[in-house]
Image (spheres, helix red, strand yellow):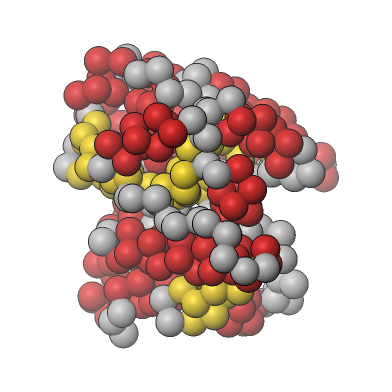
């Protein structure tokens, strides 16, 4: 029974993907919107955490109907992300092209021409998988570092979905650094979703007016390799997607390596902040992301705060 319970997420995601792929596109979109109206009530602890994040990212003390409206939009965006991701393997290059527009793509092209590799540093915002699939379809497949999931078969299934899009998938952990360095030294594209410090040992920064930590990886790699560090995101826009590639974060050596990593990570945090502020309802982080969130999460769920 315990083993079956542990594998339940795997079966759940597989079932959701099967449903997403048998439905016509318009019906799948409607189903995602319906799911977005149900989810806030199905997962109360995640609803409470997302409400905290929405208050931060909007800069408003959202309450009552205003909060409900933002929560509906946020969970609808989250459901759309999963619905699209499940269907991406059967999305044609023509559909990718028609569903994608870009601002600042010249920043990527200029960085690629320099020859030291490109790091696209992204928040969990909008439809980043769609953007990655588009880049792979036009000859720029990325190496992406993703969170290791339990059970392992769930991770392998997700990794298989992304590999089918032309992406090289590296699990977060000890091997990730070497794989990413290899890609950058070959002047390839690396995609790092970096608005959560999964290990809890990152660099302290200020984000939305409160101290937290972000992973040191993007800054460390840029400083060590000379790769361009490009803040990047892909927003949902109507039925399509709008990618934004910001100019590179300055990542030259100025002082001690530790000080440089801290400075570059803080500069990247400001960029992530600006991208999230432009569409806070599309930020798909439902987990604690600031120290104060962990205490609040424990109070809502009755669990001890995550260390």
| Residue displayed at 33% across by 59% down | 275
- Residue 37 higher or lower than 103, as above or below: below
Name the residue at the front extreme. Answer: 254
Q: Nearer the viewer, residue 113 or 4?
A: 113
| Residue displayed at 61% across by 30% down | 185
From this viewpoint, is residue 7 visible?
no
Would residue 200 appear left or right of 86 to someone viewing this image?
A: right
Q: Position of residue 43 (x, y in %)?
A: 50, 61
Total tally of numbered discs in the picture: 0
Would residue 28 appear left or right of 17 to someone viewing this image?
A: left
Name the residue at the right extreme. Answer: 2
Name the residue at the left extreme. Answer: 238
| Residue displayed at 64% across by 48% down | 224
Q: Position of residue 294 (x, y in %)?
A: 63, 76
From this viewpoint, is residue 172 visible?
yes
Q: Can you say which quadrant of the picture contains the C terminus? A: bottom right
- Residue 23 higher or lower than 44, as above or below: above
Q: Position of residue 233 (x, y in %)?
A: 36, 47
Q: Nearer the viewer, residue 251 or 295?
A: 251
Q: Can you say which quadrant of the picture contains the N terminus? A: top right
Q: Position of residue 208 (x, y in %)?
A: 41, 76
| Residue displayed at 54% across by 69% down | 263
């Amino acid at each position: 029974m315990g083993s079956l319970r542990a594998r339940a997420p795997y079966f759940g995601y597989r079932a959701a993907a099967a449903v997403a792929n048998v439905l016509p596109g318009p019906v799948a979109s409607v189903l995602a919107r319906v799911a977005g109206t149900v989810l806030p009530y199905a997962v109360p602890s995640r609803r409470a955490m997302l409400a905290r994040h929405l208050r931060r990212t909007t800069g408003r003390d959202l309450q009552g109907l205003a909060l409900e409206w933002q929560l509906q939009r946020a969970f609808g965006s989250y459901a759309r992300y999963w619905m699209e991701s499940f269907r991406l393997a059967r999305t044609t290059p023509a559909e990718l092209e028609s569903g994608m527009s870009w601002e600042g793509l010249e920043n990527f092209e200029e960085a690629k021409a320099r020859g030291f590799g490109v790091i696209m540093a992204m928040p969990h915002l909008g439809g980043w998988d769609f953007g990655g699939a588009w880049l792979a379809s036009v000859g720029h497949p990325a190496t992406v570092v993703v969170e290791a999931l339990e059970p392992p078969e769930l991770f392998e299934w997700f990794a298989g979905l992304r590999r089918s899009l032309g992406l090289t998938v590296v699990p977060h952990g000890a091997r990730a650094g070497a794989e990413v360095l290899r890609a950058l030294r070959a002047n390839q594209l690396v995609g790092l979703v970096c608005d959560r410090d999964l290990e809890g040992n990152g660099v302290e920064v200020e984000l939305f007016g409160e101290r937290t930590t972000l992973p040191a990886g993007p800054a460390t790699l840029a400083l060590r390799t000379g790769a361009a560090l490009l803040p990047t995101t892909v927003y949902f826009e109507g039925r399509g997607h709008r990618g934004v590639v910001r100019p590179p974060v300055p990542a030259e050596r100025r002082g001690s390596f530790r000080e440089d990593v801290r400075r570059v990570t803080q500069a990247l945090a400001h960029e992530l902040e600006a991208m999230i502020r432009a569409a806070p309802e599309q930020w798909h982080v439902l987990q604690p992301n600031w120290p104060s969130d962990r205490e609040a999460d424990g109070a809502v769920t009755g669990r001890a705060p995550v260390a």
